[in-house]
Image: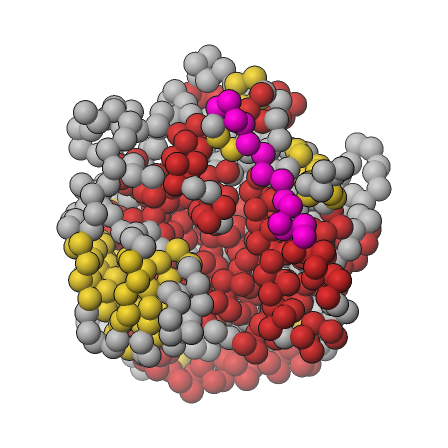
Amino acid sequence: MITHPSFTVEPWCLRETELNLDVLAQSESVFALSNGHVGWRGNLEEGEPHGLPGAYLNGVHERHPLPYAEAGYGYPESGQTMINITDGKVFRLLVDDHPFDLRYGRLVAHERVLDFQSGILSRTARWTSPGGRTVRISSRRLVSFTQRSVAAVVYEVEPVDGPTTVAVQSELVANAQLPRFQGDPRVAAAIESPLLTEEYFAQDTRLRLVHCTDHSALRVAAAADHVIEGPQSTRWTAQCEADVSRLTVTADLVPGQPLRLVKFVAYGWSGERSLPAVHDQVDAAVAAAVSTGWDGLAAAQRAYLDRFWAGADVEVEGSARIQQAVRFALFHVLQAAARGENRAIPAKGLTGTGYDGHCFWDTESYVLPVLTFTAPEAVASALRARHRMLPTARERARQLGLAGAAFPWRTIDGAECSAYWPAGTAAFHINAAIAMAADRYVMVTGDEDFERGEGIELLVETARLWRSLGHHDAEGVFHVDGVTGPDEYSAITRDNLYTNVMARRNLISAADAAVRHPERAATLGVDDEETAAWRDAAARMAMPYNDTLGVHEQSAGFTSLQRWDFEATPPENYPLLLHYPYFDLYRKQVVKQADLVLAMTECPDAFSDDQKGRNFAYYEALTVRDSSLSACFQAVLAAETGHLRLAYAYLGEAALMDLEDLEHNTRDGLHIASLAGTWIALVAGLGGLRRYGGDDGRQALLAFAPRLPEALSRVAFTLLVRGRRLKVDISPSQVRYRLVEGEPLVVLHHGEPMSLTADVPVDRPVPPAPVLPEPQQPPGRRPVGLPIEEEDLAATPE
């Protein structure tokens, strides 16, 4: 989309200079506003035309039966789908009796701007009605980071060329008509009119609707109040019915005399509280918002984002598109999580209903690493959401005949929602991702209260799962059989290497945490015998390796499989899962997304430098990237193994996934994990960030190995680490490390320890990258993010 002529490239905003209905649905996703609790898609205020109307509350969903041709033990019975709740951003405008609809009359000018610093979406339009009257319409909207339940809109209309009578209808709308759903009719039935009316109200300038879902039994309330500014002729009335509560404001206007409405909207929901309780909650929240006022909300929004950017900004010189893209990415990652407050982070955030609003493993593996270093309070919230799922996860493990907890592959409230078990239940690696996220959070923040509480319980229960899922063979080697790793083109394998190395880390982390907190471990039933069994399994974990090829195997026997016939696969047949049976994919050497490559980035100490180089080259030739989750970690390993041009290209693909609509499904919501991957590719890839050790004043807490590709002249980023703020500023020949604030910190620069003290910068040279032949991708599957001038990525340097 960013290459569409109506979108400009600017460092701190996303600007659309004219309205194009052919990318309307995509623009609704990229212009979405959220705080992790409330989400509004970037729909036009007048409601139509639209691609996908959307207002969401994190956790609000409806249940529906899951289809099976044949019954089977342990199959999940119900699916969950995030639903479109009461929409509070709707304004309908009539100009001299003509409805403001961009498909009629003449749209003279139209611009939308999403400002990453203010957190406000602004819109201006000039429109001539079919009757010949021209008006200027403007709006500003925000979803508040500081008042969790609140969103607000300023809507203003002014005549340009003569007296005009206008009517503005500000609405709360439930059960809005959605585009026809193409898929399971049971899912369609669940989302078509999911809200059952419980209460509707309209009086003076106040509106309210309360509904309940049918099957999930969740109560949802929305309330609105208004501040109206206009000429003396301004009048208003309020009315309501089951699914619409409406304030209609009329005024006779002349040029220079606008009508202005400020609308404050508050949301609340619960599966337990009574109607009066939820009703009172939203009334109180909207009253507080009115008291704060638009200017107060906007000022608090700016202050919140100023604090965020001070500890999170990434500066890029050499590519204006990458600079814009990384700030766009960070803004949306923050929006997905900031005020989630013990709710899971959906794969699309609250920007659309893609993946039914489910949370997957990519929350812990992609999103939380970014937030750990930039907004750690949001990470604690997301991990507490997983902790809340523990009772359901324990029950799921028992159902599967396992100990500990088996976390769901995809879920909203903790119940498994994946009907396809080879790529669902069998993907046990989600448990290790959760454990690693908890371990990472404690290491980077030093939050011992969390570790003694939710953290150690997550580590213990996931460790118990691995010990019961795997087994020792006759020679004592520990194997994990019948699992699916990140590569969903290889299912039900033995010893998926990513799963094994992540499980090994999980087992060791749990044992170490039990030693640090013996009393807490004892309350969980952990004894010395159990921790010894964990350490023994970790020490004897299988690591499949092909001695002839000199590479690790993605899973046991993988390198002996027939290679996929890439040369005979036409470009239009990607993604492969839509054109070939899984049976064929599962028995060939073809990789959907980074798997063993991901293992080498998440557990780098498990591989030597030579092994990383050989492994990366081997699997690069097999990886088709039929997933948005692949490019960013391929960028990290490309950078680490010295392939900086390739790393830059993969950075571009991750960064522009939604801005360029590379997967052709941005209309369904943003790819939050790929957006997070932009930061990962820059900071862990080009910056070489790795976790290293402890923080006792002698050991390095973090390690860096920065190098820049030729296309970039500077990359600088800031990290929050244990109450400190560290800035790393990379140029082609030198790196400057500056501890902006906080106690002294030890870090590694290309293996060299350095002690940093506040406001005393330390400069170090950047060693040259090795000159190596660049690995080949499958035919037609080179990175598509960015061309690198005239260079051919497949060429071998001289």
Give the percent coordinates (x, y) of residue 230.
Answer: 31, 78
Give the percent coordinates (x, y) of residue 394.
Answer: 76, 59
Closer to the camera in the image, 170 or 626: 626
- Considering the image in quadrants, where does the N terminus appear? top left
Question: What residue is drawn where x is 40% and y is 85%?
Answer: 292
Question: What residue is drawn where x is 25% and y is 24%?
Answer: 796
Q: Which residues, given as a range, are shown in magenta?
A: 536-549
Closer to the camera in the image, 185 or 692: 692
How was the colour assigned to the protein in this rendering? secondary structure
* Residue at the far top in the pictured view: 568
- Considering the image in quadrants, where does the C terminus appear? top left
Q: Is residue 395 visible?
A: yes
Q: Is residue 135 visible?
A: no
Q: Is residue 190 above or below residue 40?
A: above
Closer to the camera in the image, 633 or 337: 633
Tally the numbered discs.
0
